[in-house]
Image (tube, helix red, strand yellow):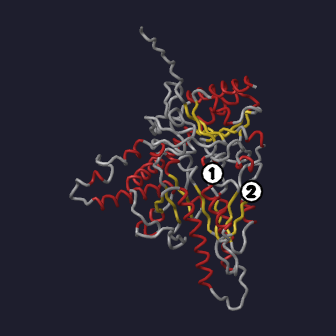
């Protein structure tokens, strides 16, 4: 007797475009470890389009344009490497260091150094800095920690060197170094500062952001300065709302204040910005920002998962102290054998941004605005755009929204989606479960609205056709949830 064969109907092709605030990310796949942050799953065909020919509306669905194994709208967490950047990692094909071994006329060590220097120049060009002011790190977390540890160490070193003030009271005597930040920073800033405060190594002031515009106010930063203040660290753009912080104004006012402080015998205040979310999405120029430190993260602009740190006048104007010891690489500031292929890929990704940044920004803004139009058309007054604040600029790719309804928590909505794949919760808040995002609450978003939040982030090759697919999927997911109530 022949056993009948049951043919299973194939499931719809998954589309990963979203990130909602509040749920742990799924386990990282091997593919994700090769260039995409968190739980995003890679597909086979991520490519950075030529700016002269932006993606056309409609057409066939590109499964790798928005997130994971389907279209992506999760670009704040990370993206697959641009094709040219990832090509640098292939040994033996003339793009990596192993392929240079056969070229006996040029020692591979010299070639590797040339590759690293070229990458450094590309990074400097992308941010408007000098190559000698850029050092390579393992990523944004290391860069941020390196800044914090360096400033604290420098405070103690300078204070010890000043020694006796000749009987004149010094307001810094006996004080711990003081650092100012805001309440919506990434965990790679918040947690090190909380640790230093708990260990009584430093004092920290967390300045709240405005509930009107989601920004930290420069006036509030200046009001928090003390005699022992040595660092102000404010992210350039928030990773959940996309709101751009007034870093240039903060830097300008701190510089003016430093003139008075130095005249009064007080230490100057340094300014750091974590530019991870902004790079590759808008123009970033350290000359306009006026900062002393700037953190660079490769996978946020289609590069490999390493990072860099810009230090204005490294070793001369701005102090930097190594956290590691054991080698002379990176001029002793970051010892350890360089990861040349990853550095090369980072440099190539920076080159693409420097050449095509305006086109990338314009394309992402157009698709993001279309996404918000479609959400408003489908859900009407039930939509609350958590990333839109009056008077505040935001990144061109970010859309954080909530669909009002008692059953429509972001986590629940995404679980009902049939074609939309998403991890839930910002990468730095993956332990929140069903709790609303502290960032959204800090920005004045009501608790019931924040609990329903979903963050969508478009990329360089996202299309309007993919947006239509996602909005339809969300609409059906909401209908299923409300039908169960």
Residue 257 placed where, x, y %?
A: 69, 70
Q: Residues within 10 Å of mark 1 (few under 14, many from 20)?
A: many
426 relative to 217, above or below = above
243 relative to 407, above or below = below
Q: Nearer the viewer, residue 255 or 136?
A: 136
Total number of numbered labels? 2
Side of 355 where 376 appears, left or right: right
For numbered disc 2, what is the local secondary structure? Answer: loop
Side of 182 where 79 appears, left or right: left
For numbered disc 1, what is the local secondary structure? Answer: loop
Residue 53 placed where, x, y %?
A: 46, 34
Q: Which residue is mark 2?
A: 208
Which marked residue is nearer to the observer: mark 2 or mark 1? Answer: 2
Residue 211 placed where, x, y %?
A: 77, 50
Distance Cα–Cα, label 2 vs label 1: 15 Å
Q: Nearer the viewer, residue 63 or 214?
A: 63
The circle drawn on residue 293 is none
Which label's residue is closer to the chain start, 2 or 1?
2
Quadrant assignment for the C terminus? top right
Q: Which residue is mark 1?
A: 237
């Amino acid at each position: 007797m022949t056993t009948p064969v049951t043919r299973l109907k194939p499931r719809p092709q998954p589309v990963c475009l979203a990130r909602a605030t509040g749920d742990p990310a799924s386990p990282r796949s091997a593919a994700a470890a090769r260039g995409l942050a968190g739980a995003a799953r890679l597909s086979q065909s991520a490519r950075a389009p030529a700016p002269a020919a932006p993606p056309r509306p409609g057409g066939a669905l590109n499964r790798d344009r928005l997130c994971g194994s389907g279209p992506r709208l999760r670009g704040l967490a990370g993206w697959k490497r641009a094709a040219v950047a990832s090509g640098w990692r292939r040994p033996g094909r003339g793009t990596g260091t192993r392929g240079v071994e056969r070229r006996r006329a040029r020692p591979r060590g010299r070639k590797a150094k040339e590759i690293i220097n070229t990458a450094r120049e590309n990074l400097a060009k992308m941010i408007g800095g000098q190559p000698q002011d850029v050092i390579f790190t393992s990523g944004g977390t290391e860069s941020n920690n390196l800044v914090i540890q360096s400033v604290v160490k420098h405070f103690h070193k300078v204070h010890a060197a000043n020694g006796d003030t000749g009987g004149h009271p010094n307001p810094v005597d006996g004080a711990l170094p003081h650092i100012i930040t805001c309440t919506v920073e990434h965990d790679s800033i918040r947690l090190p500062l909380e640790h230093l405060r708990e260990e009584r190594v430093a004092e920290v002031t967390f300045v709240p952001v405005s509930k009107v515009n989601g920004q930290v106010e420069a006036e509030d930063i200046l009001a928090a300065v003390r005699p022992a203040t040595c660092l102000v660290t404010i992210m350039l753009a928030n990773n959940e709302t996309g709101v751009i912080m007034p870093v240039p104004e903060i830097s300008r006012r701190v510089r003016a204040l430093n003139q008075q402080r130095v005249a009064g015998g007080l230490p100057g205040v340094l300014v750091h910005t974590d530019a991870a979310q902004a790079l590759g999405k808008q123009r970033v120029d350290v000359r306009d920002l006026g900062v002393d430190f700037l953190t660079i993260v490769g996978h946020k602009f289609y590069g490999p998962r390493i990072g860099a740190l810009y230090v204005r006048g490294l070793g001369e104007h701005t102090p930097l102290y190594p956290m590691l010891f054991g080698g002379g690489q990176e001029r002793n500031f970051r010892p350890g054998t360089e990861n040349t292929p990853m550095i090369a890929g980072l440099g190539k990704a920076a080159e693409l941004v420097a050449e095509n940044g305006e086109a990338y920004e314009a394309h992402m803004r157009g698709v993001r605005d279309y996404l918000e139009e479609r959400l408003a058309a489908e859900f009407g007054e039930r939509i609350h755009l958590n990333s839109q604040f009056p008077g505040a600029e935001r990144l061109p790719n970010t859309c954080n929204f909530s669909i009002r309804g008692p059953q429509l928590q972001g986590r629940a909505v995404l679980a009902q989606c049939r074609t939309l794949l998403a991890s839930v919760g910002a990468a730095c808040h993956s332990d929140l479960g069903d709790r609303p995002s502290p960032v959204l609450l800090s920005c004045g978003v009501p608790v019931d609205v924040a609990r329903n939040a979903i963050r969508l982030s478009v990329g360089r090759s996202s299309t309007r056709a993919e947006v239509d697919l996602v909005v339809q999927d969300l609409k059906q997911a909401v209908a299923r949830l409300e039908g169960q109530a």
